[in-house]
Amino acid sequence: RTARYSFNPKTTSTLSPNYIFQDVHRVLVSMQKIVEGRLVFTRPSDFYLIQCKLTSENEEVDFDVEVCKVWLLQLHGVRIKKQGGSALKFKEAYSIIVDMMNI
């Protein structure tokens, strides 16, 4: 799937979408062990999409992590989009995911 979104060098790569998706999955599994609270993620059968829910004592955030082709470029990127919940918790999760990815 091709998408337009704001991207940066940490979230884009010339690697295959399969490899990027495996790295995102590795990061989310590692994140389950280190984040405060509970992280649950599921993958719908279509696209390279993972739906995540991060819950702590008082805060909750739902977000999607998707591997997609960057519009007009020969790159693939990771799009992380907040669906609902705490903006502060999302910012924390976003920075952890981006820092742990090896793409």
Image (cartoon, rainbow, N blue to C red):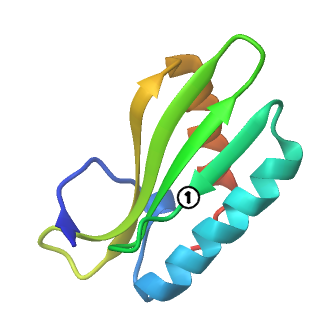
Q: At which x and y percent is residue 23?
A: 63, 74
Q: Residue at x 75, y 61 (%)?
A: 29
Q: Residue at x 43, y 89 (%)?
A: 16
Q: At which x and y percent is residue 54?
A: 65, 35
Quadrant in the rendering for residue 53: top right
Density class for disc 1 (Cα within 10 Å; few <14, some 14-19, many ≥20) is few
Left or right of residue 78, residue 102 in this image:
right
Farthest residue in the front direction?
45
Q: Residue at x 24, y 82 (%)?
A: 74
Is residue 15 visible to us here? no
Q: Quadrant of the N terminus?
A: bottom left
Q: At which x and y percent is residue 91?
A: 56, 29
Farthest residue in the left direction?
72
Quadrant in the rendering for residue 72: bottom left
Q: Residue at x 65, y 16 (%)?
A: 59
Residue 47's place in the image compared with 32, above or below, is: below
Q: At which x and y percent is residue 81?
A: 38, 42
Left or right of residue 33, residue 87 in this image:
left
Left or right of residue 23, residue 26 in this image:
right
Element under disc 1 = strand
Most foreground residue, 74 or 22? 22
Q: Quadrant of the C terminus?
A: bottom right
Residue 63's place in the image compared with 47, above or below, is: above
Most foreground residue, 32 or 13? 32
Quickly name the residue at label 1.
Answer: 42
Is residue 92 visible to us here? yes
Q: Report the amino acid beneath label 1.
A: Thr
Farthest residue in the top direction?
58
Quadrant in the rendering for residue 17: bottom left
Most foreground residue, 18 or 77? 18
Left or right of residue 44, residue 100 in this image:
right
